[in-house]
Image (spheres, rainbow, N blue to C red):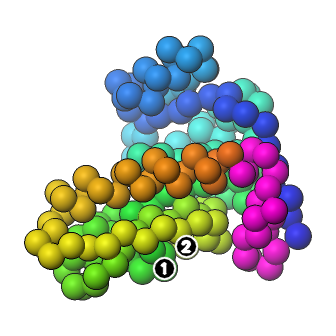
């Protein structure tokens, strides 16, 4: 069993200079860093991990982060990288989850918070919440409702991680 308890927020990193997350962090006197992607995933991953280590960060919380971190991040932060995804994984992984759900004609999609592993949208599932797909929904309307659920669920998971209430046993997450 792996105990993944951690302290509070220390650093906000973005690959985009002018994003709302950096502005909010600066206003809250939280350290920030910008690491441009530049097309080299290995370099990008190393720079993010190095910046996190330099700030004493013990976990990475991905939000609005549309990049895939390389294996170095998984090795340096095992069961300590969170991601939020707009579907009920393992259904509809990848970049177009909402479009995939609509094209499949499902009546329910949702939000999943999971630990990041070596595969895209695959790691141990921490929490999920269902969202009904209404008749007439399109990508715009569904993309409007999903963040409401993400903004309720993700902070609860982050808090549980920080408070040490998440354990991983044989690839399954146990809340304590």
Foreground tag (1 vs 2): 1
Q: Residue at 73% across / 28% down in the picture?
A: 54
Q: Where is residue 26 in the image (x, y as percent from the top left)?
A: 51, 16
Disc 1 on helix, strand or loop?
Answer: loop
Which segment is the magenta one? 160-176
The spot of residue 44 in percent (x, y) is 52, 42
- Pick the front one: 23 or 38: 23
What mark, if any, has residue 90 been given in the picture? 1
Residue at image position (42%, 56%) is 149
Secondary structure at badge 2 equals loop
Position of the N terminus, as image quadrant, is bottom right
Q: Where is residue 165 in the image (x, y as percent from the top left)?
A: 79, 56
Q: Is residue 34 visible?
A: yes
Residue 55 locus on image (x, y percent): 72, 27
Q: Which residue lies furthest to the left in this view?
A: 136
Left or right: 88 in relation to 131: right
* Residue carrying label 2: 122
Tell me which corner region of the image, top left, top right, bottom left or bottom right, holds residue 157: bottom right
Q: Can the viewer see residue 36?
A: no
Q: Which of 79 and 71 is in front in this view?
A: 79
**139 within the magenta span:** no
Rate crowding at label 1 as few (under 14), some (14 to 19) or many (20 or more) other CA atoms within 10 Å. Answer: few
Cβ atoms under marks 1 and 2 closer than 8 Å: yes
**Which quadrant of the view contains residue 29?**
top right
């Amino acid at each position: 069993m792996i105990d993944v308890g951690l302290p509070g927020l220390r650093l906000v990193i973005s690959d985009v200079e002018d994003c709302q997350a950096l502005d909010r962090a600066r206003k809250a006197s939280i350290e920030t860093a910008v690491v441009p992607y530049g097309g080299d995933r290995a370099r990008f991953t190393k720079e993010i991990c190095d910046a996190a280590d330099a700030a004493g960060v013990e976990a990475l919380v991905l939000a609005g982060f549309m990049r895939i971190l390389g294996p170095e991040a998984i090795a340096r932060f095992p069961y300590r990288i969170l991601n939020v995804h707009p579907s009920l994984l393992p259904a509809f992984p990848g970049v177009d989850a909402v479009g995939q759900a609509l094209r499949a004609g499902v009546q329910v999609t949702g939000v999943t918070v999971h630990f990041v592993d070596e595969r895209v949208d695959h790691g141990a599932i921490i929490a999920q919440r269902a969202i009904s797909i209404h008749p007439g929904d399109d990508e715009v309307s569904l993309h409007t409702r999903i963040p409401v659920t993400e903004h309720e669920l993700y902070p609860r998971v982050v808090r549980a991680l920080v408070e040490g209430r998440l354990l991983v046993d044989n690839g399954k997450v146990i809340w304590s």
